[in-house]
Amino acid sequence: MKNTAFITGVTGQDGAYLAKLLINNGYNVFGLHARRASDTLWRLRYLDIEKQVTLLEGDLTDLSSLIRAMALSQASEIYNLGAQSFVATSWTQPILTGQVTGLGGLNMLEAIRIVNKDARFYQASTSEMFGKIQEPMQSEKTPFYPRSPYGVAKLFAHWSTVNYRESFGMHASSGILFNHESPLRGIEFVTRKVTDAVARIKQGKQKKLHLGNIDSKRDWGYAEDYVKAMWLMLQQDNPDDYVISTGRTTTVRDMCRIAFEYVGLNYEQYVVIDPRFYRPAEVDVLIGNPAKAKERLGWEAKTTLEELIHIMVDADMKRVSRE
């Protein structure tokens, strides 16, 4: 009998890659589909799995729709990847971010508790919860200090997951994922903004790239590697929380250099520092310690930052040339 999974955020970067992984492992895959945009399915088409995912209409802010989705799917594994996930937007829409990203996680936990408490649950937590870092390298034991409404909302969903695990005995785990990117990343995120600009500048369709703080440091990995860790967490006998990262931190500046050099350009000639893109409170450095994930899950990042950026530039070069 096939395993059945239900994914919120199935039309996003991580949701699409996770759906592909689960389908390849023989799962029936259901996904929550909130009708908020004109074309939300392009990532599923990109991976050629659109017809293999059963979409159920609903919204993380609507508990009744989540209960119906749980009842219809009869899923044994639930992955909550849905969120308002762009940090910059969380400053202009903090209440929406709290409702979708924070309370949405709690709504999903409550739907599981009501319909099928034995189902296994994965919460997509984030390195943004560490924010103003309390340790040079962040692990599962590092204190949290979020620096954005997004980080605060994610922390609420994270602690709700811990609370339901301890209060109701649910198999509920959180993956504290550090930045992870791919050609499916939204254009508003800095890595994809850079690789898209590189393709456009190389092909004469753009002249400059405007960025904010390019000296901030991030631990970047490949999303297709990271969704494997999500799945592995729900295959464990006992639920737990895991940092998923590469253990390497790089500045936005160096990431730009890698991307521009790949097409034979010097980033210094094209990158413009624009104060409009500075945040009210910056997260200066993030670097994760993935030792627990390696020891307990047998997981480690396979793709280097250089390989990741090359994959993204290649994909954007092809896309821009077709426009």
Image (spheres, rainbow, N blue to C red):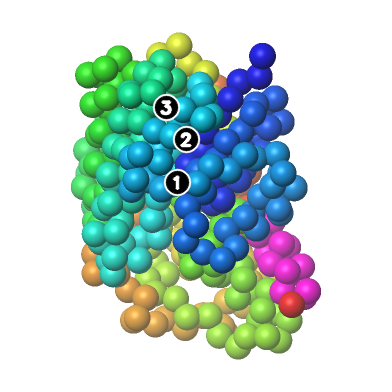
Q: Which mark is residue 121?
A: 3
Which quarter shows the N terminus? top right
Name the residue carrying label 2: 69
Rendered location of residue 110, percent (x, y): 30, 30
Pick whichever, 67 or 299, lies toward us. 67
Q: Which of the two marks, 3 or 1, is nearer to us in this view?
A: 1
Q: Is residue 319 magenta?
A: yes
Q: Circle 3: is it few (<14), some (14-19), or many (20+) Cα within 10 Å?
A: many
The overriding secondary structure of the stretch rendered in magenta is helix
Name the residue carrying label 1: 58
Task: Name the N-terminal-most of marks 1 and 2.
Answer: 1
Q: Circle 1: is it few (<14), some (14-19), or many (20+) Cα within 10 Å?
A: many
Amino acid carrying mark 3 in the image: Phe
Circle 3 — which element?
strand
Which contiguous range is marked in magenta? 309-322
Disc 3 to disc 2: CB gap under 8 Å = no
Disc 1 to disc 2: CB gap under 8 Å = yes
Rendered location of residue 3, percent (x, y): 61, 20
Task: Tell me which residue sits at (51%, 64%) in the image.
Answer: 37
Q: Circle 2: is it few (<14), some (14-19), or many (20+) Cα within 10 Å?
A: many
Disc 3 to disc 1: CB gap under 8 Å = no
Task: Tell me which residue sits at (53%, 80%) in the image.
Answer: 209
